[in-house]
Amino acid sequence: MSQNINMAVLIDGDNIPSANVKEMMEEIAKYGNPTIKRIYGDWTRPGLNKWKNLLLENAITPFQQYGYTAGKNATDSAMIIDAMDILYSNKVNGFCLVSSDSDFTKLATRLREAGMLVLGIGEKKTPNPFIVACDKFIYIEILRSVVEDKVEKKEKGISSVEKIGPKEIKLISSSIRDLSDEEGWAFLGDVGGLIQKKQPNFDARNFGFEKLTPLIQSTGRFEIEQRETPKSRYKLVYVKNK
């Protein structure tokens, strides 16, 4: 991902918790420069009050959207209309859609058809159609700080870290096989990119690892080799199925 990509960040205020906005914006900055930052919601509702200071601290512009009809989400429509206006303005190269709502599936698909990078951020309850419509989808839960995560685990008695299972092993193995040379080795950077295309919500942090390399090492199912590069002090990592 290029830091030169200008991104429009559109947040569904009715569908996203206000906690961890700082971590969320830091994560988005890894993929591009958030030149447009907007949040949509009915700001007359008391439930959105906790957003106000956070918007000022993160330079996010609030957009008022009244709920004209009971049972209908006017916020979704406002976000979709704005997204298309921004698309045709040619001011950005990518979008970050922050919502756990499957109503944005078609929007994500349309933006990608137009050549836009589409990053999705939402809770783990997000329906799969929206997840797979994005280039990459990040769960809000993994953006929590270590302290907050520990508190949640203690209070709820659960862990937000998933266990690596046969499905993930198969995904990694098949991606290595798809990219391997005659000896079975594949460049880890390419493997990670292919995994992301196959499963946009795959993230080493979901399994308690900061990077893909230690995740792969933990399985004991793959060989890992570091190779020197002539013009760089960094070593390239290659992987192979055992």
Image: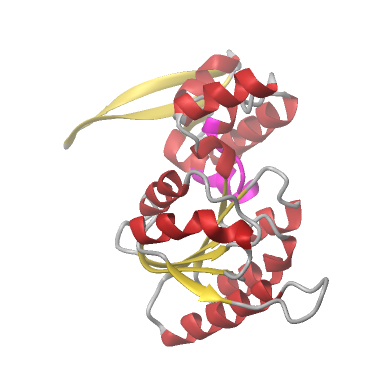
Vertical comparison of 131 with 23: above or below: below
Relative to residue 58, is residue 109 drawn left or right?
right
Q: Is residue 196 magenta?
A: yes
- Percent across and percent down for residue 143 are 49, 39
Please state the total of marks drawn on the protein image: 0
Q: Quadrant of residue 89?
A: bottom left
Q: Nearer the viewer, residue 174 or 19?
A: 19
* Residue found at x 42% / y 53%: 28
Q: Which image quarter: residue 210?
A: top left
Q: Residue furthest right?
A: 71
Residue 156's x, y, as percent? 68, 23
Q: Is residue 104 above or below residue 215?
A: below
- Residue range (magenta): 193-205
The answer to whether residue 163 shows anywhere in this view is: no
Q: Residue at x 54, y 80 (%)?
A: 82
From this viewpoint, is residue 5 visible? Answer: yes
- Left or right: residue 14 compared with residue 50: right
**Along the horizontal axis of the image, is 139 left or right of 100?**
left
